[in-house]
Amino acid sequence: MAKLEVGKKAPAFTLTDQDGRKVSLKDFAGQRVVLYFYPADDTPGCTKEACQFNDELATLAKLDTVVLGVSPNNEASHTKFRAKYGLSFSLLCDPEKKVMVKYGAFGEKVLYGKTVVGVIRSTFIIGPTGTIERTWYSVKTDGHAAKVVAALAAN
């Protein structure tokens, strides 16, 4: 698995969101983007992570930063997940995991002591010019959104 390096150009992408709209990284030129990859909607760790990012949206907005979550789930799943937990940011569909692979967020990982292939919970801060400013791989969900906000505030 190739990990992205700070200072490199973030891989371009276009994915559909929960409403079927196409969303591209270039749509956010001039803003910071927190792009995070997670395994599945409405599972305990993924729900905790999404809700923590949602709780930080006002702070992130003051930092001129948007949040985008990406999983292999489809539009219907994302819509239901957003409604159930009152999520206010876009969730993008990557069923073929092509964007996940580009970001090093899909591949071999250790789960319960076994090596498996799957989504590697990862977060990236992408700067206003489209470069990677910070990376986190194999994220632990507890307190992660607060760490991301602290990293953004330190910039």
Image: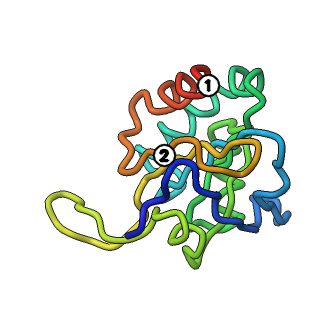
Task: Say above or below: 120 vs 137.
Answer: below
Q: Amino acid at mark 2?
A: Thr
Question: In the depicted view, which residue is nearer to us: 82 or 56?
Answer: 56
Tell which circle, 2 or 1, labels the residue nearer the N-terminal end.
Answer: 2
Q: Residues within 10 Å of mark 1 (few under 14, many from 20)?
A: few
Q: Dot 2, crowdedness within 10 Å: few (<14), some or many (≥20)?
A: many
Q: In the image, is 46 to the left or to the right of 110?
A: right
Residue that extends furthest to the bottom in the rendered view of this protein: 96
**Residue 67 percent location from the top left of the image:** 68, 41
In the image, residue 101 above or below residue 69:
below
Amino acid type at circle 1 is: Asn
* The disc label shown at residue 135, or none: 2
Q: CA distance from mark 2 to mark 1?
A: 14 Å
> Residue 39: where, in percent of width, then height?
46, 59
Q: Residue 118, which numbered label?
A: none
141 or 136, which lies in front? 136
User: Furthest residue to the front?
Assistant: 7
Question: Quarter of the image holding residue 33?
Answer: top right
Q: Which residue is mark 1?
A: 155
Identify the image quadrant of residue 85.
Answer: top right
State which mark lies toward you, 2 or 1. 1
Q: Residue at x 40, y 59 (%)?
A: 120
CB within 8 Å, label 2 to label 1: no
Task: Report x, y in % for residue 46.
Answer: 47, 47
**Helix, strand or loop under label 1:** loop
| Quadrant of the snapshot with the C terminus | top right
Q: Is residue 25 above or below residue 147?
A: below
Task: Describe the element under mark 2 as helix, strand or loop.
Answer: strand
